[in-house]
Image (spheres, helix red, strand yellow):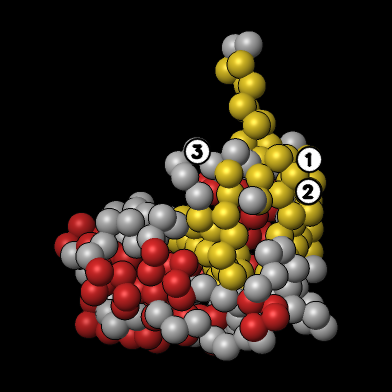
Amino acid sequence: MTAPELDPADAASTCPAPDGIAPALAAQSLYRFFRVGEEETLALQGVSLTVAPGEVVAVVGPSGSGKSTLLACLAGLDEPDGGTVSVGGQRISHRPEQERAQLRARTVGVLFQSDNLIEHLTLAANVTLVQQLAGRAPRRAPAELLAAVGLAGRAQARPGTLSGGEAARAGLAVALANDPAVLLADEPTGELDTATEAVVLDLMADAARRGTAVIVASHSPAVAAAAHRVITLADGRIS
């Protein structure tokens, strides 16, 4: 994966997006805690992050550092206990779930390590469903999206018939179905071999070149090496 070029001064920054560019995503002072019995875990402790359109950001850190919690809050899948998240200038946090879901469908693509596809639907139907949830006319047809990730001949295949690499690419097509402002990927290449990982990362770089902000949480050195910025989380804080 070769990330689109940004000014080196911007790439060295830890939190802000490049000056003069309206952010695709802005998170301010995010806190998230979980309580089990008498024990409280601080998963996020004041995390702030701004990402510009077309920027690729890798979020790294040990297991339990808060990476998945951060991405869930950025996607509106989880609510922070403090702080706010905005995507494309619209606040997605601290809204009713129905509103968050609608904003997410229109502005955010989410790619997990697995379980990105509905098993009983064809690949084309998976893409179509996500586009219908956005409630607007899609810019690209399912066949075009699948062709873009190298699955032109697999539109009518079901997820259970796919190889690991095909499933990862199909999941990416679904995540990009509505040309989102932000793509959030949580360990998307964790189960892939090196060659297949490179293919998936190149596809993410293509999305960034089209203007999508890409945030990837990963343990993979390949992801970190290809990003414009690397943000390290430790104990729920940016270190």
Is residue 15 visible from the viewing direction of this image?
Answer: yes
Which residue is identified by label 3?
A: 64
10 Å crowding of disc 3: few (<14), some (14-19), many (20+)? few
Q: Residue 82 got which mark?
A: 1
Up-down relation of residue 236 to residue 156 (above or below): above
Find out whether the residues at labels 3 and 2 contact each other: C-beta distance under 8 Å: no
- What residue type is disc 1 on? Gly
Percent position of residue 16, x then y: 75, 68
Q: Nearer the viewer, residue 1 or 113?
A: 1
Q: Quadrant of residue 106?
A: bottom right
Percent position of residue 90, x then y: 79, 64
Percent position of residue 149, x then y: 35, 80
Residue drawn at x 63%, y 41% is 236
Q: For the N terminus, give its image quadrant.
A: bottom left
Percent position of residue 25, x then y: 70, 66
Find out whether the residues at labels 2 and 1 contact each other: C-beta distance under 8 Å: yes
10 Å crowding of disc 1: few (<14), some (14-19), many (20+)? some
Which residue is identified by label 2?
A: 29
Q: CA distance from mark 3 to mark 2?
A: 19 Å
Residue drawn at x 37%, y 55% is 113
Q: Which is more N-terminal, label 1 or label 3?
A: 3
Q: CA distance from mark 2 to mark 1?
A: 7 Å
Q: Which is more N-terminal, label 1 or label 2?
A: 2
Is residue 124 visible from the viewing direction of this image?
Answer: no
Residue drawn at x 54%, y 48% is 67
- What residue type is disc 3 on? Gly
Up-down relation of residue 97 to residue 200 (above or below): above
Q: CA distance from mark 3 to mark 1?
A: 19 Å
Q: Quadrant of residue 26?
A: bottom right
Residue lying furthest right in this view?
A: 20
- What residue type is disc 2 on? Ser
